[in-house]
Amino acid sequence: MPEKSSPPPVDLEELLEREEGQFGWHQLRVMVLCAVATVCAALSTSEFIFTSSRVNTRCLIPECESSGSQQEFAPSWILNAVPSEGDGFASCERFNSSAAAADGTCPAALFDTTTIVDCEQHVYENTDSAVYTLGLACDEWRRSLVGSIRTTGALVSLPLAGIVSDRWGRRTALAITLVNTGWIGLLRYFANTYVGFIISVFAESAFGSGAIASCCYIMVAESMPRKFRVATCSLIISFFATGQVCLGLLAWALPYWRHLTLVIYAPQLLFLTYFWILPESNRWYLSKARYEEAEAGLRRIAKTNGQQLSEKSLIELRSAAEEQKKRTAEKSSSNEPWLIVLVFQHKKILLRCLLTPVWWITMTLIYYGLSINAVNISGNRYLNYVTVSAVEIPGAWTAMVLFDRIGRKAVNIGAYWICAASQIAFIVMPDDMYWASLVVYLVGKYSIAIVATAVYLYTSELFPTQHRHRLFGYSSMMGRLGSIVAPLTPALGTTIWEHLPFVLFGGMSFISGLLMLLTPETRGCRLPDTMEEAEHIGKTDQRQAKPGHRASDAEVISRL
């Protein structure tokens, strides 16, 4: 008697999509709640650009003015006492003098123009920035360090949020990071010392805002049907860019840093309600064998989306979840060598592990660097920031439109090199051509926004399913080095050469495009499952093999 063949394994992904529905009111609810959270994440992670923004200063001239009274920033006699610098005067130096002026006068004869000394006290053009409160005049490196401390905190936040998310749930991780952002950020309102200010920035980023966007991405991706996940990355970038636009407008309306801090963080305490109004991911419930909660959640979703949920489907879901856990356990118990050993055994994979961090470091450095430096270029700094942030939205969607049409490498290389060309053009642009300079600057931000979306998918396609998550995470984590260095670029421009940041952006962008020529094109290829398949991806025979199994962008995202 012939032995009966075992039925094919049930696809948990397909079952969940069938029972949760395609895109209904439940998915819309999750999307809206995560959109609000991502907008607030953008406000929190970027507010330092305005709250600790650069302020024009000059030396206090005690021979001509009193330190206890309100000083005029640019009095008629200022160039008698302070060296000229460009179209203005020096911020941190003055001419030496050993005498006091008569009341109401400050003659040039009072000062020795051959001897220049550093300021002992400073006069600020305005008191809106924390630079005034913390006494950071002429201390560009400590001022810029605020942004680097924030991005370092974000580096810490990712593994912390990952632990909470995997152990206690996606909703719990997102709600905790949101509420922590609110109350820790509010503490900064009362900061009067540099150390206290820096500690609150790090703590708020490490235990809150640094992980909000990633928590939202996971929540949305696990709630969306597979075919809609292609757009999830672009949606998160679009929501984040919207938040940055809102930040520019808020800072324009509320320039004083304490008021801006209050408006940004106080409303985020309302995210405490997410413990009740945001539904938990059913995929997380199933992964933890919490079948009763998963079934109850699926019933609520079915009711919300106007669908019927059968008992047979619930039994199949439980069976599929148990089968998936069993396969995962078998894979983890295998005697496969350590990942680092496997990487060194496969030279092409090793080369990609060396190249992908360069792409990511370049992308994050330029992406954040252009946003941060936007407030220091000529023109209205608020308008500059708003437009530079808004251009990210079409950039993200351009990547999704072109990815399958012209190929992964063409999109990434083209965007990198357009960004490099725009940096060169910005450097040589005359200062009086404000609008032309802004357009060139926007082209640079638009192109790096394309890279921010495209390199995400391309990197994930270069590695095998078995190790994709860890190798992708390695590249992404290395990329954080760029976001840590980015806030320091204004200090580089001030202390060394004003165009140095843009030379750095252009050079790294050009080199990253060149390095991408060393990796294969993955458009039309099956998603590799093993190291051997990943090494041969992009070859003609692999490209044509199993055409019905070509990996879609949605599949790439779902298998990360």
Image (cartoon, grey):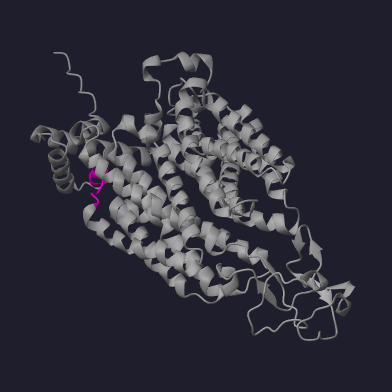
Q: Position of residue 252 (x, y in %)?
A: 50, 58
Of the 4 image quadrants, the one containing the C terminus is top left
Q: Is residue 285 magenta?
A: yes
| Residue 558 appears in view | yes
Place of residue 109 in the rendered image (x, y in percent of width and height, measured from the top left)? 89, 77
Residue 315 to residue 289: above or below: above
Depth order, front residue of 483/291: 483
Q: Nearer the viewer, residue 77 or 404?
A: 77
Look at 76% across and 56% down and name the residue there.
Answer: 496
Quarter of the image for residue 299 reads: top left
Magenta segment boundaries in residue numbering: 278-287
| The stretch drawn in magenta includes residue 10 | no
Where residue 362 appears, as percent x and y from the top left, is 61, 42
Q: Residue furthest front?
A: 104
* Displayed quadrant of residue 513: top right
Residue 333 in view = no
Q: Who is closer to the viewer here, 261 or 458?
A: 261
Q: Is residue 64 left or right of residue 266?
A: right
